Image: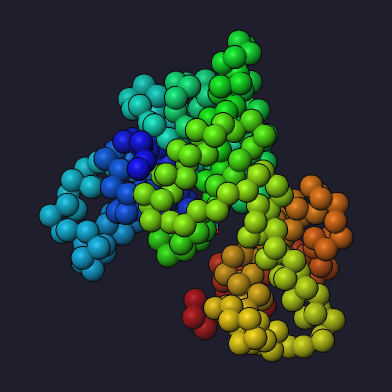
């Protein structure tokens, strides 16, 4: 059972709002605080969360009479200082932009302003949890407090779209305590997710393995060894993947795929993660997949 009565989600993008939705609808966390530096993003996030809650009521995943109380339990703040002065979250899940300097600053500030019992989690796909735990430690001068602050940092990696994907990777940094792993796991289970546990290794489990297949698919396409369609069909029908690797890359965003590949390559030095030239050129051209209506496939007709 989760001990989380108050959850703060920092970053109201697609992932942050997805996480807030499952926390509200599946885990029924009594108080949810949305934190975003952008007032526009926070309001857009609240509207999207409301839509998810109303949809859940419509399809009877929650009782319709609960809609108002769930929506009333959602609060918005625009800074960590405001969060700490008005609320007492048991867990903060950071889902801010994928930028190591932003995240280090966030973890330092969270650690400084929130009591040591507050679990601090990141939803990052590629940034080291160990580095973020270090930022949380650096908020304290006393060595015992610094160690305790680092020990409460953990990775809780949801997948996109959060409402649909069943997996959560719980990621343990070198400094993370057993208790933090248990609390993170219990929260994810309350959100009705299946959890897997790994140490803080580049790409965690899913991206580490999947990015190799994606890279091979792009290399084959670049060498014109098979068409895009045949590469995707082969993996769908031969491996029972719901989507082929090239179309999946379009959906994830080619810039994100490139970023993940580069970060795993940089961390491991292993050539199987080196980004293929075709991927680099497509990103330079601004062909980022579904979000720009052009990637390996053309989405302009549907845009
Ligand atoms: N998009 C995906 O498919 C996916 C999947 C799994 C994990 N992730 C990870 O989830 C995180 C968020 O991804 P996203 O796609 O939702 O990002 P996004 O860029 O859509 O949203 C990020 C949000 O964070 C806000 N933000 C930025 N700096 C902030 C700060 N200092 N304080 C408060 N808010 C801040 C921005 O205003 C924005 O609303 C990233 O770490 C990403 O790696 C993304």
Q: Position of residue 214 (x, y in %)?
A: 71, 70
Q: Examine the rendered structure and indicate whether residue 266 appears above or below residue 51.
A: above
Q: Position of residue 103 (x, y in %)?
A: 60, 37
- Whether residue 85 is visible here, answered yes or no, is yes
Q: Position of residue 206 (x, y in %)?
A: 63, 60
Q: Examine the rendered structure and indicate whether residue 192 appears above or below residue 132.
A: below
Q: Quadrant of the N terminus?
A: top left
- Whether residue 101 is visible here, answered yes or no, is no
- The count of marks equals 0
Q: Nearer the viewer, residue 49 or 217?
A: 217
Q: Examine the rendered structure and indicate whether residue 149 appears above or below residue 25.
A: above
Horizontal relation, residue 72 to residue 194: left or right? left
Q: Residue at (80%, 54%) from the top-left corner?
A: 265
Q: Nearer the viewer, residue 261 or 296?
A: 261
Q: Nearer the viewer, residue 107 or 203?
A: 203
Q: Position of residue 287 (x, y in %)?
A: 67, 70
The image quarter in which residue 29 lies:
top left
Horizontal relation, residue 143 to residue 216: left or right? left
Horizontal relation, residue 177 to residue 166: left or right? right
Outermost residue, top direction? Answer: 142
Colouring style: rainbow
Q: Residue at (65%, 28%) from the top-left corner?
A: 134
The image quarter in which residue 207 lies:
bottom right
Q: Residue at (48%, 22%) from the top-left corner?
A: 116
Q: Residue at (21%, 65%) from the top-left corner?
A: 60
């Amino acid at each position: 059972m989760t001990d989380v009565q108050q959850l703060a989600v920092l970053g109201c993008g697609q992932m942050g709002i997805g996480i807030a939705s499952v926390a509200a609808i599946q885990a029924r966390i009594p108080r949810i605080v949305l934190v975003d530096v952008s007032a526009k993003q926070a309001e857009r996030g609240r509207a999207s969360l409301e839509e998810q809650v109303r949809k859940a009521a419509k399809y009877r995943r929650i009782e319709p009479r609960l809609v108002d109380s769930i929506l009333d339990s959602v609060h918005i703040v625009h800074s960590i200082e405001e969060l700490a002065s008005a609320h007492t979250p048991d867990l903060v899940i950071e889902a801010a932009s994928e930028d190591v300097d932003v995240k280090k600053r966030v973890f330092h500030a969270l650690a400084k302003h929130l009591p040591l019992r507050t679990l601090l989690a990141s939803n990052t796909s590629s940034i080291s949890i160990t580095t973020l735990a270090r930022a949380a430690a650096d908020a304290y001068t006393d060595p015992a407090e610094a160690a305790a602050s680092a020990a409460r940092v953990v990775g809780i990696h949801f997948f996109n779209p959060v409402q649909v994907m069943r997996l959560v990777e719980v990621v343990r940094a070198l400094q993370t305590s057993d208790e933090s792993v248990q609390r993170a796991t219990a929260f994810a289970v309350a959100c009705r997710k299946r959890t897997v546990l790994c140490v803080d290794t580049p790409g965690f489990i899913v991206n580490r393995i999947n990015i190799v297949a994606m890279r091979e698919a792009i290399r084959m396409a670049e060498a014109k060894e098979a068409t895009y369609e045949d590469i995707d069909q082969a993996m769908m029908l031969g491996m029972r993947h719901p989507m082929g690797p090239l179309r999946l890359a379009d959906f994830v965003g080619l810039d994100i795929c490139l970023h993940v590949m580069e970060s795993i390559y940089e961390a491991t030095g292993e050539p199987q993660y080196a980004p293929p030239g075709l991927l680099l050129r497509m990103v330079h051209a601004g062909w980022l997949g579904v979000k720009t209506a052009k990637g390996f496939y053309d989405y302009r007709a549907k845009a």
